Amino acid sequence: MSVLTSERPSGERHGEPGKRGRRGAPALALAILTGAAARLWLIVLLTAGWEVGTRIAKDPFFPPPSTILRVMHEIWFSGPVSQLLLTDKAIDDFRPSFINLFGGWSLAAAGGVLLGIVIGRSRAVGEILDPLLQFGRSIPPPTLIPFFIVILDLGTPMQVTTIAFGVVWPVLLNTIDGVRTVDSLQLQTARVFDITGAQRLRRIILPAAAPKIFAGLRVSLGFALILMVISELIGSTTGIGAHLINSQQSLELPEMWAGIVLLGLLGCLFNAIFVLVERRLLSWHRGARRLDS
Amino acid sequence: MLEVENLTHAYGDAPPVIVGIDLEVKPGELVSIVGPSGCGKSTLLRCVAGLQSPTGGRVLLDGKPVDKVPGNLAVVFQDYSRSLFPWMSVRDNVALPLRRRGLGRAERREASGKALESVGLADAGAKYPWQLSGGMQQRVAIARALAYRPEFLIMDEPFGSVDAQTREDLEDLLLRVRGDSGMTILLVTHDIDESVYVGHRVIVLSRSPGRVRADLPVGLPSARDQITTRERPEFVHLRAEVGRLVRGHETPADPAS
């Protein structure tokens, strides 16, 4: 929903610079600047306040944001151009984290969609499995980390399993729902024109369920980042989570803060990329919905 | 072509919605079915199309009982916005059923292009259905049915959701299809004028439970025109008779006798 509601104003914004563009480049630049200013002024203000406050307080537990950014740059983003400015430490930290994150999320996505189709298409299977699904989704995923550590030992398999198990639920439940609630007239149309089996699944059921499946995938991606950090905090010597623990233990507070800010930025970045992809793939859905209302 | 024998249907334990319907449609005929709302028109169509198994009686198409949707049958639904797939372009919507006809990519494209051209939408193929007006969307649904090349076409209040002008255009399109394709067509409508204007025969159903109340031949020449046909005495007389039957008066009131 939020994707849809946030879309309309941004669509209008796209129109504005185009109109002003005819009046010349300076006007366009001004329009972009005022547009950015309208959206970002609060963040700028808060950051400035944070900077001033922490400088006055001089509390080692609360380094100023300028220090945090400097440390972030130093430890992760001051590498050679051939490594896209990433330092060796950045590669050491990010690689295992991203492998965990996207490995677990991809497994959850594939498993959730496949299982969701099977369960959603069969009322009998759905009814049998429903209590089990309700129980499974109710288990807070981090509680399983100790168990996964026992059977899988520390390391990537344990983390990927934790993430996959924890984030599969939104995908699975949304896929079941999406597959189950395909418009009856669309299914009747398929029957009339003898569109059956794999064709029906691929051309009708999956596209019809896609908006719900994508909503589930997006929620899962957010969960996956959380579980990635938790699993690295508890049972890992590598990754961004492990960096947090290490800098905490060696009382390097700016380094620890750098990790926190980095994770926030990564969350925003992944979500933005996901929304872009979703908008591209589901443009028909937004278009149809916009004309409906 | 189509024979309906003693067709009866009830949903669950509820009283039947249609009772003892007998109906015969000859090849190439366009039969309109009218009736008051709730007379089971749509149930009748769903049983004929094989979308619903009736609780009594039977439906024969070309002498064979209909137990699933026959391969030589297409349906145009009233609700075009739900019956067209919004994730496919207009062209793909029309071409999708042709996969099952064993046509290759190029042939499908050609057939869908031709069908769209025949409904006056030659340039709309790359658009999405929701980018078109209601009348145009229903044209796409008709084009999809035409491209499928059925022998028997069922239309369930196909022009019920469009404005009056568009409706007349679509009625004339239907008459053209009737003339060009030789398809047998069963059209359900709640519009009395329309039932007479496009039909060879008009079947009037009674209020619930639906029964066949009258089966009236339309004695109009096959070439029809929105203005001149509607002012002919036969048209005026027949639409009045259908109107009385739909509203429930047994005999036409005739002050002269």
Image (cartoon, coloured by chain):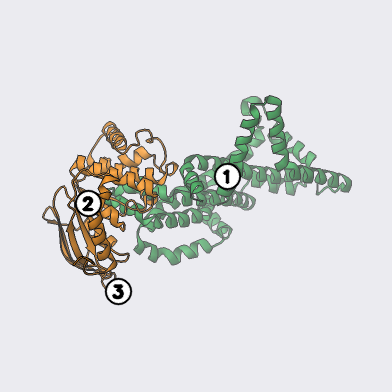
Chain colours: A green, B orange
Q: Chain of mark 1?
A: A
Up the image or down, A82 lies above or below A244; here it is above
Q: Can marks 2 and 1 be said to lie on one chain?
A: no
Up the image or down, B79 lies above or below B22; here it is above
Q: Residue A128, percent across and down?
A: 38, 66
Q: Foreground residue, B91 or A242?
A: B91
The Cα–Cα distance between marks 3 and 2, rounded to whole angstroms, is 33 Å
Residue of label 3: B14
Dot 3 amino acid type = Ala
Q: Foreground residue, A1 or B91?
A: B91
Dot 2 amino acid type = Gly
Q: Is residue A221 left or right of residue A122?
A: right
Q: Chain of mark 3?
A: B
Residue of label 2: B199
Residue A7: image tag: 1
How many other residues sit within 10 Å of disc 3, few (<14), some (14-19) or many (≥20)?
few
Q: Residue B169, percent across and down?
A: 33, 44
- Residue at the spot 43% in from the left edge and 44% down from the top edge: B130
Dot 1 amino acid type = Glu
